Amino acid sequence: MGKRIKRLKNIRLHREGTNTLLYAFLALSLLGFLLWYLVGNTIAFNIYLIIAIIVYCIMVNFFRCPIRYFNGETETVVVAPADGKVVVIEEVMEDKYFHDKRMMVSIFMSLFNVHANWFPIDGKVKFVHHQNGNFHKAWLPKASEENEHADVMLETDDGVEVLVRQIAGAVARRIVTYAKDGEDCYIDEHLGFIKFGSRVDVFLPVGTEVCVKMGQSTTGDQTIIARLK
């Protein structure tokens, strides 16, 4: 019981969800009141009430913001920037910044995952760039280039560059990036937040040891997805 209480204390709601949850509660309450007032059908109201509670609980779950700390040495370690599932592990040509081949690891976040994003490495933020675009389904290959996304270039103390790309999906319409140009960044700190289902790509140097497999579930700030040389 003690461990259960401790885990609950380490979970809070993300500030990005404050207004959304408030407006959703008011809207669902108003719809329920109108249904009761206009229809007056107890069965219909009870069905609506069950559906409304389920929908609201899903939204509360989505905006969870667990407090996490990586347990171990962070040098050369690349942790998962998000909760979700590994949907891509492949060598790709990155022509926008590196102009050479990179190892890309992509994590897809469903509506049921925590959507806070963490810095995957310790180092410094070189730059942050936001790109407008489409809203294809996030798991499609073209989503990485064509969808609206935010690129965050990080550099380790050894000079190794790692690109993190927050990608909007068919449902996700708002990418929030807390990273700022020139700031130091550390594992355990939030890089940003993506509202509703979407994806995060991590571009690593070719030859990096990848520590995850396709379809593997990841926990942001906890799962080691790679080790830099």
Image: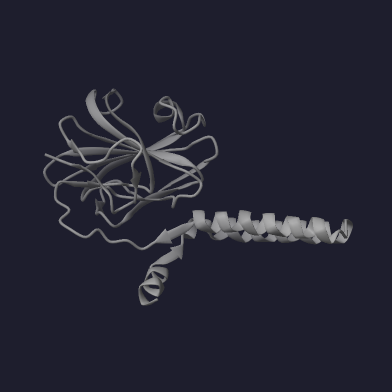
Looking at the rendering, in which quadrant would you find the C terminus?
Answer: top left
Q: Specify the quadrant of the image occupied by residue 48.
A: bottom right
Q: Nearer the viewer, residue 13 or 72?
A: 72
Asked which colour scheme the image uses, the reply is one colour
Q: Specify the quadrant of the image occupied by residue 101.
A: top left
Can residue 213 be spotted in the picture?
yes
Residue 83: x %, y % from top left: 38, 48
Can residue 34 be spotted in the picture?
no
Would you say 157 lies left or right of 21 here? left
Q: Nearer the viewer, residue 118 or 161?
A: 118
Would you say 161 lies left or right of 24 here? left
Q: Nearer the viewer, residue 210 or 125?
A: 210
Q: Specify the quadrant of the image occupied by residue 156.
A: top left
Residue 56: x %, y % from top left: 61, 57
Residue 129: x %, y % from top left: 36, 37
Tell me which residue sits at (11%, 43%) in the image.
Answer: 158
